[in-house]
Image: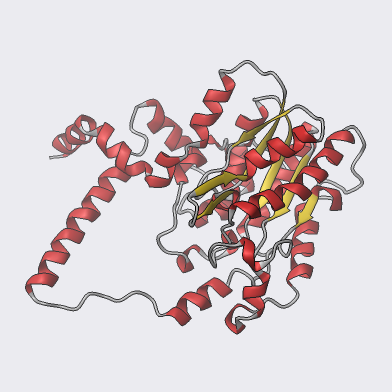
């Protein structure tokens, strides 16, 4: 029986792996972009950009689509500096995966790195069911790096042993195959359950009430950001870049402050102070940290999840461009902030 199961997995590994990867990874794969850029001849200095769907802007009325990376490229070049933005943003990308892909970005001879800080990623994953998850990217972490971010790995249901095991599965051509088999099995069970529900005329479970959705959304802005696995990861990123002597910039992605202030369930007292505490915890200097949480008016947002309209991307790129140019112009100046105490780094 075991032999039959192993044969079935091997025979159907391509289809199972496709399903196990997940839709988000299929739409925009940061690793594929890294390989494409690595194969190209470098013409300009490169700046890597890490973010998620908040870097992707859309106007539903005009069907216009834009990206923060493209706007940054245009505005930096307009300022007289020839720079290629290596846009590694991807739907569902978390700080853990920024860290996992950091060595790949630095191997592209990146002169600087920009990181989005999305406050929604500081929520408990159980409060965000259905969102994209990309645990397979954790295979890029070596063992020393995994030890630095154990809490973040645990939040993804992983241990420090999972990255090397995933690398082994990749070498054997089995990466995502078991995940695909699991999804296939869950699909069979779901279909069977739906059939029974229809036969017995049972009611379908309704979606969450609006107030519960708001309550969960409010968790984004009411947490202690330093007491979160993401803070551990951002701290490790800072330590790694300090050792590599690469300029970097963290920017706190804008949120719809007007909407939050008008919605009691989303009240966020002392948000600016808590974000400053996060900056201090991760070890970024004030010049390496750009708090843009209240930088845009409500008209720039297209939903309560803080996704932006196209004009929002254009406006957001301006302060990031200015700060990045400043950092790159002073890249050899010693940063006064002490590096956080951390051992190991991505790629060590």
| Quarter of the C terminus within the rendering | top right
Q: Quadrant of residue 101?
A: top right
Q: Is residue 251 left or right of residue 52?
A: right
Q: Is residue 162 left or right of residue 200?
A: right
| Quarter of the N terminus within the rendering | top left
Q: Residue furthest left?
A: 199
Identify the residue at image location x=19%, y=30%: 11
Identify the residue at image location x=51%, y=73%: 216
Identify the residue at image location x=64%, y=68%: 298
Q: Nearer the viewer, residue 101 or 316?
A: 316
Q: Nearer the viewer, residue 190 or 174?
A: 190
Q: Position of residue 38 (x, y in %)?
A: 58, 21
Q: Quadrant of residue 48?
A: top right
Q: Position of residue 321 (x, y in %)?
A: 77, 43
Say whether residue 344 is visible. Answer: no
Q: Nearer the viewer, residue 324 or 105?
A: 324
């Amino acid at each position: 029986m075991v032999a039959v199961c192993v044969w079935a997995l091997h025979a159907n590994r391509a289809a199972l792996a496709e399903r196990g990867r997940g839709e988000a990874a299929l739409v925009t794969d940061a690793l594929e972009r890294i390989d494409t850029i690595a194969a190209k001849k470098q013409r300009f200095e490169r700046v890597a950009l890490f973010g998620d769907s908040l870097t992707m802007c859309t106007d539903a009325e005009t069907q216009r689509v834009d990206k923060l990376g493209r706007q940054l490229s245009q505005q930096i070049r307009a300022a007289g500096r020839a720079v290629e933005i290596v846009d590694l943003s991807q739907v569902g990308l978390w700080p853990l995966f920024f860290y996992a892909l950091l060595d790949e970005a630095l191997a592209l001879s990146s002169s600087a790195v920009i990181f989005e800080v999305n406050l929604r990623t500081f929520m408990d994953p159980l409060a965000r069911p259905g969102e994209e998850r990309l645990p397979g990217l954790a295979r890029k972490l070596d063992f020393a790096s995994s030890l630095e971010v154990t809490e973040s790995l645990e939040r993804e249901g992983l241990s420090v042993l999972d990255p090397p095991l995933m690398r082994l599965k990749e070498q054997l051509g089995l990466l995502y195959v078991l995940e695909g088999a699991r999804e296939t099995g869950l699909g069979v069970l779901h279909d069977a359950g739906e059939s029974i529900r229809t036969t017995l005329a049972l009611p379908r479970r309704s979606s969450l009430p609006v107030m519960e959705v708001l309550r969960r959304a409010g968790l984004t802005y009411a947490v202690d950001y330093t007491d979160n696995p993401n803070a551990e990861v951002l701290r490790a990123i800072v330590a790694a870049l300090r050792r590599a002597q690469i300029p970097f910039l963290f920017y706190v992605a804008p949120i719809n402050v007007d909407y939050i202030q008008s919605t009691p369930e989303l009240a966020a007292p002392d948000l600016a102070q808590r974000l400053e505490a996060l900056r201090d915890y991760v070890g970024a200097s004030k010049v390496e940290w750009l708090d843009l949480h209240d930088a845009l008016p409500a008209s720039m947002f297209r939903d309560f999840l803080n996704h932006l309209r196209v004009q929002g991307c254009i406006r957001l790129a301006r302060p990031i461009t200015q700060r990045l140019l400043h950092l790159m112009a002073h890249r050899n100046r010693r940063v006064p902030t002490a590096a956080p105490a951390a051992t190991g780094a991505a790629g060590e």
